[in-house]
Image (cartoon, rainbow, N blue to C red):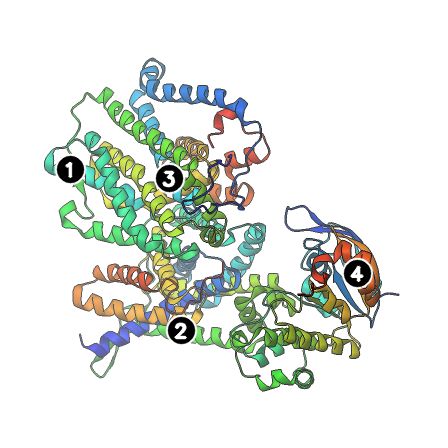
Amino acid sequence: MTHETEKLDTTGIPVVDQLDVDVVPSRPGRAEGVLSRRVALGLVLALILLFPVIAIPVFSSYAYVLQVGMLTLMWISMSSSWNIIGGFAGYISLGHGVFYAIGGYSAGLALAHWGISPFLFLPVAGLAAMAVGLLAGLITLRTRGPAFIVATIAMLFLFLLWFDNWEFIGASSGLDLPLVDIPVRWLKVPFYYAMSLSAIGAVYLSYRVAHSKFGLGLRAISEDETKAEVAGINTRWYKVIAFSLSAFFIGTAGAVYGYSLTHLRPLTFFAIAVAARMVLMSIIGGRGTVAGPVVGAILIVGVNEFSVRQFGQTELNIVVTGAILVAALLFFPQGIVGSLRKSGRLPAFLDWD
Amino acid sequence: MNWVQILVLGLLLGSVYAMMASGLTLLFGVMRVVNLAHAAFILIASYITYQLFENLTLDPIISLVITMPLMFGLGVVIYLLLFPRIEGSPRYVEMTVLLTFGLALVVEGLLTFVFTGTFRSVRPDYVSTSIHVGNIFIPSNQLYASAVSFVLLIGLWAMLRFTKTGTAIRATMQNRGAAQIVGVNVKRISAIAFGTGMALAGAAGSLLSFLFPFFPGKHWQWIALLLSLIVLGGMGSIKGAVIGALLLAIASAVVTDTFGPTWSPITFYLTLFLILLVRPQGLFGAKLRL
Amino acid sequence: MALLEIEDVVAGYGPGPDILTGVTLSIEEGTSYCIVGPNGAGKSTLLRTIAGILKPRAGEVRLDGTIVNGSRPDQMLAAGVCFVPQDASLFPTMTVRENLVMGGYLLGDRALKRQRLEMVFETFPALAERKSQNAGTLSGGEQQMVTLGRSLMVEPKMVMIDEPSLGLAPMIADQIFEKIRGFRELGITVVLVEQNAVKGLESVDWGFVLDLGSKEFEGPADGILADPRIRELYLGKQLAPREPR
């Protein structure tokens, strides 16, 4: 990642001047990659948007394939968003399931009580999650390091307990949503497209943050927070904003997903496995990079589908998830994208930083 | 229920929480490890106790003699296998969180695989009896569990205070570099401390087995509670962990009595948030040295 | 035979570059030494490597003729090599007395510990006065005295001190250097690393000049101080004479 030339803040003091802000070291010879990168991006976007069309003749179990596609896009959305606070800023949150739930439930309630389609309600769901993120961030980000992680866990449990006991939303037995009025064969199509909006939005946000002064500041914070403060960065606001930004596309993902389930229950959103996967995907893919969480999401969804085929829907799945996480931390802490970049072998189409 | 009753019950439960929390704090204090898998290991011990009771009718309190050394050994092995590898990394503490998170998932999956998701509990005779002192009634299982916890806590304190190993552990908790300079073999001491923390987890598992029913997913509730407790008390402070545990348990008893059982964990997490707002380092924490 | 011999030692931190690029020197028993040189020369790194905190990537470290590469710090201490690092190496919530007693951690015998403690209090009367005070509340100079006193507890053959005067006011620093000179009287081999080259070299017999990770020069301490070329090349900034105003 190159450093922008504009490095002075409003008082004329150099910002992050002496700091080595490359969490993942940058590679020379960037220019050649740009064109192939654009082409690659275009191809990827086209693939995503045309997938439901392409898939019709190719796959026999069309609905299943679209479902997997939708889930992949969902996890891309979630892990890329989580990466903004967990990867760029280095603050590990295990409580992001809260935003997932807020998105799911706010959209669900809008549908159940006012008849507004979650597809239209998406941005509002995202905003709702972001608002909660702002408030929660103001409190949890008063702590650092491990205490912060614990605070996010407490946040998760607080919301879980609240939702589990709140009769208005159906408490632990949940809330039923009306079904979408489309023939079963094409049922998944709108969900797929809605989720792709969320995923594209999340990755785009991640990209914009990474290439901004804000993102630079976040990386500085993750490297050495004290130095960042001394360099003039308002660390408190940077962190809180990152935290709340990271909530938006998790909320939208939750809204679409909840609608696809047609029945909302707190445990679906608040389960620890949700946090586990967001974290795992970012780490395995490459924390702190833009492409990393995407790679991680695709990989883990793939592994999961494979493992379900092999072992059935059993608890061995979480053993596998946990084991992969442990192995990744011990042997590839930089993740796939990170390790590739470090050894100089990162193909241009994956270098989105 | 009268206030003395509430206080007594709170203190009894609190001593069990205190023992669980002190094991966890020890791990953070000595090795800067935030062990998200601590409650999962407690569960392992609970299941072992359950098997021993079902197959050999071994009293759960007696099974401490088995679970504690077993968990000690497991702790040393796990420590030596996993942690020295990540020791030099930047953001070591976070790595320990993620690593133990993964461990917790693995343990939970394996436990579900072996024991399924059915709720289990160990039911020796004293689960249904109680003792009357004046107009207070104390369930026997609570009494015995907290008596054992109390003994273990005293044992821990004595070990830390009077033995050479304990002194080395305390020194390492205060300043790892300085301990190394005066001749403490910090790697060995870290492994021993890890084993000790796990041994306490083992004891907790055996005791909890006859206090509350359990299933493989239950450890998340416990670890959330324990971690919050430690943050509340101030990370790395055993004293803070113990006091925090007692306060929590008493407050929990009060809230349960007044508002019903569902409110008590909510109140706790809300209190945690309030305290974090005002005093992010917890009640007894020093400024966090990462 | 020299007490400590270092031959072609190469060392660095973690996966980072070599800081020491091949250092060779020898330390004679009973002599006091000061290592000087510009920032980044590897002075602290050298002490750390000898102490066992850092493992050499190449070369040999020999104590009394035996190779001690890769020994742990506690093993080096048991062999009589004591390291006093530059950062706070005290136990802040323990008292002065407890900190000193910790210095005797490797000693088995309680009576011996008590005896040594007495000796330390005699050498550092200021510490005796404050023995029940929490070490974290002491002044910079007093803390430094605690770390020095603590090293005496094991009756070491050799004490290595990293930047003894760091952060101390000149008068206090002088007191510390006086104490360090006292170590030599006790027969302890002293190896200092000092940014304040003048003060450091004035307190010892022999000097090593380190630059870019290897030894550039060695010689009698006062000789180094007097030699204008060395001053200019390596000790320039610190020794620039004050212009009369």
- The 10 Å Cα crowd at callout 4, few under 14, some 14 to 19, many 20 or more, is many
Q: Name the residue beneath numbered marker 2.
A: B148
Q: Residue B111, position in %: x, y?
A: 41, 50
Q: Which mark is residue A314?
A: 3
Residue B279 placement: quadrant? bottom left
* Mark 3 to mark 1 CA distance (whole Å): 34 Å
Q: Specify whether disc 1 shares its chain with disc 4.
A: no
Q: Between marks 3 and 4, how big is the CA–CA gap?
A: 67 Å
Q: B282 or A94: which is nearer to us?
A: B282
Question: Does A279 appear above or below A59?
Answer: below
Q: Residues within 10 Å of mark 2 (few under 14, many from 20)?
A: many
On the same chain, marks 2 and 3? The answer is: no
Mark 1: secondary structure: helix
Residue B239 in picture, x, y percent from top left: 42, 72
- The residue depicted at 59 percent of the width and 74 percent of the height is C143
CA gap between label 1 and label 2 equals 53 Å
Tag shown at residue C208: 4
Chain under disc 1: A
- Sooner in the amino-acid sequence: mark 3 or mark 1: 1
**Residue at which label 1 appears:** A110
Instruction: Confirm or deny contact between disc 3 and disc 1 (CB under 8 A).
Output: no
Tell me which chain the residue with mark 2 is part of: B
Element type at marker 2? helix
Amino acid type indicated by mark 1: Ala
Kind of residue sitting beneath label 3: Thr
Q: CA distance from mark 2 to mark 4?
A: 61 Å
SS for callout 3? loop
